[in-house]
Image (cartoon, helix red, strand yellow):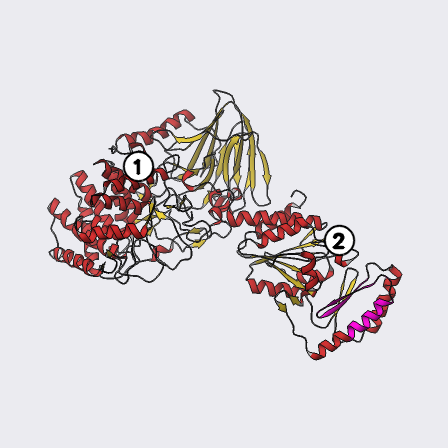
Amino acid sequence: MQALPVELRQSLTGIARTPHLLVACDYDGTLAPIASTPNEAFPDQRSMAALRSLAGLHATTCSVISGRALRDLAALSRLPGEVRLVGSHGSEFDVGFVNVLSEHTRDTLAALHRELEALVRVTPGALLEVKPAAVAVHYRNCSESVAQRMLKVLEAGLRTAVDLQITHGKAVVEFSVVETDKGCALDVLRHEVGATAAVFLGDDVTDEKAFARLSGPDVGIRVGAGQSQASFRVADPASVAAVLAFLLEERRAWLHGDQAVPIERLTMLANERSVALVTPDAKVNWLCHPEPDSAALFADLLGGPSAGHFSIKPEHGALPLGQRYLPGTMIVETRWSRLLVTDYLEHDLASHRTDLVRRISGSTSAVITFAPRPEFGQVPGRLVSESDGLRVVGTSDPMVLRSPGLVWEITSDGVHETASAVVRLREGAPVVLELRCGTDDLSAAVAEESARHRRAASYWSSWAAGLTLPAVEPDLVLRSALTLRGLVHVPTGSIMAAATTSLPEELGGVRNWDYRYCWLRDAAMTASALVSLGSFAEAEAYLGWLHGVLATVPGPERLHPLYTLHGTQLGAEAVIDTLPGYAGSRPVRVGNLANQQVQLDVFGPVVDLVVSLATARGSLSDEDWTMVHAMAEAVSRRWHEPDHGIWEERHAPRHHVYSKVMCWLTIDRAIKLGEQFGRALDPSWIALRDMIAADVLKNGWNDEVQSFTTAYDGDDLDAASLFVGLSGLIAPDDERFQSTVTAIEASLRSGSTVYRYRRDDGLPGDEGGFHLCAAWMIESYLLTGRRTEAEDLFAQIVAAAGPTGLLPEEYDPITERSLGNHPQAYSHLGLIRCAQLLSQ
């Protein structure tokens, strides 16, 4: 690959990321060396292998466009049907002729054949090639004088021919009775397959018509010498094999990901404001700045190494022995036999700062690779080495890597720069790297690293010490609690649904969403889980954030389902089309269209949180009661409307059972809260609560399936409908609830997980089961007296957690792989709830 010019490699890397790629090549002189006898021009097998593999990739079309007759091209190349063949300089395709020959044209072709056959018969070394719509005369094997004499005869005899197109190539002249043009053929292919960019390789003057059609991101590559309109040039067919092999590697990595780490094995770092992910071999592959919902500085998670990472590993490639959190903290240690990497995000920094500290200790040599790619890799950056470290140049926000004493080697791919260094470690002399985002200060920190390490550890352990943990799986519950606490954005009080965007619900699929925002529902449920463990500050801060958001709208019914961490509305959902996605799962999205949906269930979890917090505190603030009252009023005005539901399906609203139940819960909890704290109740609430309950029982129950269904208008099932019983709307011993548990178990449970639903939701592909839905099933088992099943399913959720105790959103029981954004608040709050119930 080093034989290819760096500019060519950069262009091929770029075009490999186009949505639909067309790769087209000439044959003779490009895929096959020029041969004196045309039927002995056998292709370079390396090129053939690469072309076959490219043609087998998703959204990739390959073609050979040759001057040869289609039948001869097929016989010599022996390419499979996936590779489109175009013969006779573009006049015949493998799916039929471009032109149907008229009787007059056929007569012209026959006369041409006779005349040229007579000429070749008396010309030593000349060969005649007959094609469906052309006749070609090859003179490669003629002496120069004979060739010149024959060309003069051809020129004189056919000078007046008006129905023929004459094409000169390398030692060949072709006479066609139809228009032949490789450029037109390329355009036809591009249009047929919907290609968004094309690569064309050719060596002949006839290929120039194809080069002339290239534009924009297209790449033209001339093989051999001679003037050309192509942007790049390689020496010979052997170099073509290198081009195709390189393109295959880049395209495959783009489509399918580059050795994606299993999602559950990713470990989260956190402080009170930022999050990052670390792989099991100490690669920081996800970090956004200045906020968790900002653009990524390291997006290796979604784009492979070229999208940015910060790696540390032994020089001689040993495998890591393990990774763990320091107990009760969010500090991560990754260990090899003679190497230890300790990672944490620093605390007590200015609001514009994100500082990652990496301490390397041991008795071996370690290789460090620092490859920042600001703005998801869309901003070219430069690295400048100074005595105390590296400075990142060209970004809107200052950024430095403090690394005194290290000698960096900086390389460039033409757009981005990467720094590498080797550090020789000695026992008792750790090396400390400090990535500082939001400052250009490379000077030593005021506090020693050991003090900052203790401060980071104390931040988490002091908080964790105040929790009340259940008897069942206390360590895993503590890790879940720390994870939820790590998703809290302390400066604002908002809470993220997950730390990432676009981790897929199906590998290779399009169900990839951005969860780095604050959903009113998810955040309320997270805060409630922490209240249940004895930590109230997160709930108080979240409700304070929510009061601020409410001040921006006329009333609760005008709330959006989600907001940025700072409480502002999201921009339009967008796609980062330069990133291939985790394991090739595209598109990579930022923003979320659910922001524009109507979700009437969000009031229930918020009011439930107020009840939990007020009960735990023994007091109810006037501001919180005013909000509860306003939400109850919003429910009274809108509960009868259809909505998009908890799962945010992107189709027409329905009368979702879960949403109706949450409207009921809003009124029910408001009544109980008012009674508990002596607040004045709206006299209509009790009747309204009864009305909503009656509506759910009448329209949500389906006699045919013997279950409460997803919505009033169908017989499909939904795990969220379990809340008919989980909310208290009906009693646990009600036969309708027990029948619903059985029906949902039969329809939606698969081994260790429970699917949300199995209906067509208007999106292509499939998804895994949700850990949260499995948690609801466990609670339903316990309510209906099925403790053994509850314990068994809980044990399977525990087993699905990663080595450091983290859970993403989903699990696929067929492939036994975790799916979805990670770590996911829903999954961890569900685990906490189940452990608490099983401990009672």
In this view, 91 is above or below 497: below
Check if residue 37 falls in the magenta segment: no
Check if residue 134 falls in the magenta segment: yes
Give amino acid for label 1.
Ala
- Start and end of the magenta stretch? 111-139
Which residue position is annotated with label 1? 481
Name of the residue lying farthest toward the right: 145
Choose between 602 and 347: the one closer to the eye.
Answer: 602
Q: Secondary structure at mark 1?
A: helix
The answer to whether marks 1 and 2 mark residues whose Cβ atoms lie closer than 8 Å is: no
Q: Position of residue 497 (x, y in %)?
A: 34, 46
Label tally: 2
Q: Quick check: 223 left or right of 567?
A: right
Q: Position of residue 377 (x, y in %)?
A: 51, 46
Asked where in the image residue 79 lies, by quadrant, the reply is bottom right
Q: Quadrant of the C terminus?
A: top left
Name of the residue lying farthest toward the bottom: 104
Q: Earlier in the sequence, mark 1 or mark 2?
A: 2
Q: Quick check: 145 left or right of 621?
A: right
Which residue position is annotated with label 2? 225
Name of the residue lying farthest toward the top: 428
Distance between the Cα atoms at labels 1 and 2?
A: 67 Å
Q: Secondary structure at mark 2?
A: loop
Query: Residue visible at 81% across and 69% down?
Result: 117
Choose between 552 and 376: the one closer to the eye.
Answer: 376
